[in-house]
Amino acid sequence: MTDAHVWPASAAVGADGAMRVAGADLRALAAEHGTPAYVLDEADLRSRARAWREAWNDAFGTADVYYAGKAFLSVAVARWVHDEGLRIDTATGGELAVALRAGVPGEAIGLHGNNKSDAELVAARDAGVGRVVIDSMAEIDRVAAVAADGWGGDPGRRAPVMVRVTTGVHAGGHEYIATAHEDQKFGLSVAGGQALAALEAVLDRPELELLGIHSHIGSQILDPAGFTLAARTVLALRSQLAALTGVLVEEVDLGGGFGVAYLPGEVPLDPVRIAKDVAATVADACAELGTPQPRISIEPGRSIVGPSTLTLYTVGTVKPVTLDDSTVRTYVSVDGGMSDNLRPALYGARYHAALVSRTSDAAPVRARVVGKHCESGDIVVHDVDLPGDVAAGDLLAVPVTGAYGRSMASNYNLVPRPPVVAVADGVWRVLVRRETIDDLLALDQG
């Protein structure tokens, strides 16, 4: 179909104007499961996971690809990505619990977070997670204390850790998601000397095993230059640590943030291209530094689950509004909104939408798709052309909502969160059921 980058790979529109994903008619899916609903193409998600693994293994000989669970994690998704050869990066005890429930072995899981609780660290220890990413000087002592009696049930095993550093490379679509500049909460500064001090401090703790150095420069990055520049900075720090201590760490993690296409005409970051660019940079930098190349790991999330999923809505109120320049914008209200997709309100993120339940010969109108919440900023799609006869009862689909749609969803205005419905070979099944009013009331102690 046209604008293929923004739709699940199997999405197709028939002569009747109805969209089908993996052979499943979205009209029938909506009739059974209601709307809003997140609709996930299982084969597409698996294919994207394989593409990242294969591209980086081809470029480096061997590499570790961690699926960034914060984008979206469920038991089924954790199983699928692990089946495809990926490890899983978790940022909280909840994400860790889901990965473990899926049967992912602790060794294939990492634990991130700038403010890990003692309970989260104990859970990581008990599960024998393959790495804990240290995010502050204070955390070094805390992880060492938890690991005093061993790791993963082995009293002689040290806690495997990496140190997250900030490289000063500012990349990403919004200030809130650019995570490598100095004035933010994550990591330890390379330029300020804190990163080197933390690495040395880890080496001084007998309870800890220093696996390597971790960097994450932002999210929704479409230019490979940020990754190559950050890689050079981290490799130089690795060489500096070796010169001072004699320890050359084996691994460098370059994080995630690989961008996707949200709007027609946009081009996503290609895993093959970025892998080749980074591999060339790593080879050149290590040759200049006189050090062997490290094992490389990365953490794609959005680029795997984002385009595999769309959100299906039912249209309610349609309201033409005359603007100051006498043009008309048609406000199309749907039965969800910022509670199922917070990114437009939080970041001003831009999305696309399409009528997916019927054909229309009506001339397009300038439309804004809005939600049902009591906020003027409850916008799902800022500007999109929709058929002029769009009306209550029509189905609209908003693509590329797999990342941070369900994972950031809320119960604002006490709206139950939508289900996640996976489709494969014309058959659908619920991965995460729809919340109900009874679910909401069950938490209220009266």
Image (spheres, grey):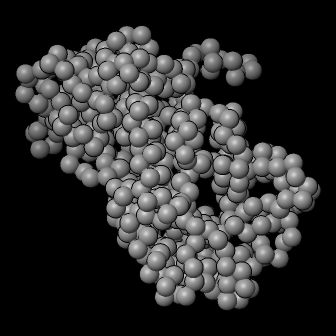
- In x, y percent, where is residue 358? 19, 17
Can you see residue 416? no
Tag count in the figure? Answer: 0
- In x, y percent, where is residue 415? 51, 23
Specify the quadrant that holds the N terminus.
top left
Q: Is residue 429 above or below residue 413?
A: above
- In x, y percent, where is residue 98? 66, 36
Residue found 27% across the figure and 33% down from its top: 353
Camera-side residue: 50 or 433? 50
Camera-side residue: 37 or 183? 37
Residue found 34% across the figure and 25% down from its top: 22
Q: Is residue 156 above or below residue 417?
A: below
Residue found 7% across the figure and 21% down from its top: 361
Specify whether 307 is left or right of 167: left
Q: Quadrant of residue 328?
A: top left
Residue found 73% across the figure and 18% down from its top: 446
Q: Is residue 137 above or below residue 316?
A: below
Specify whether 345 is left or right of 243: left
- In x, y percent, where is residue 341? 43, 36
Can you see residue 389? yes
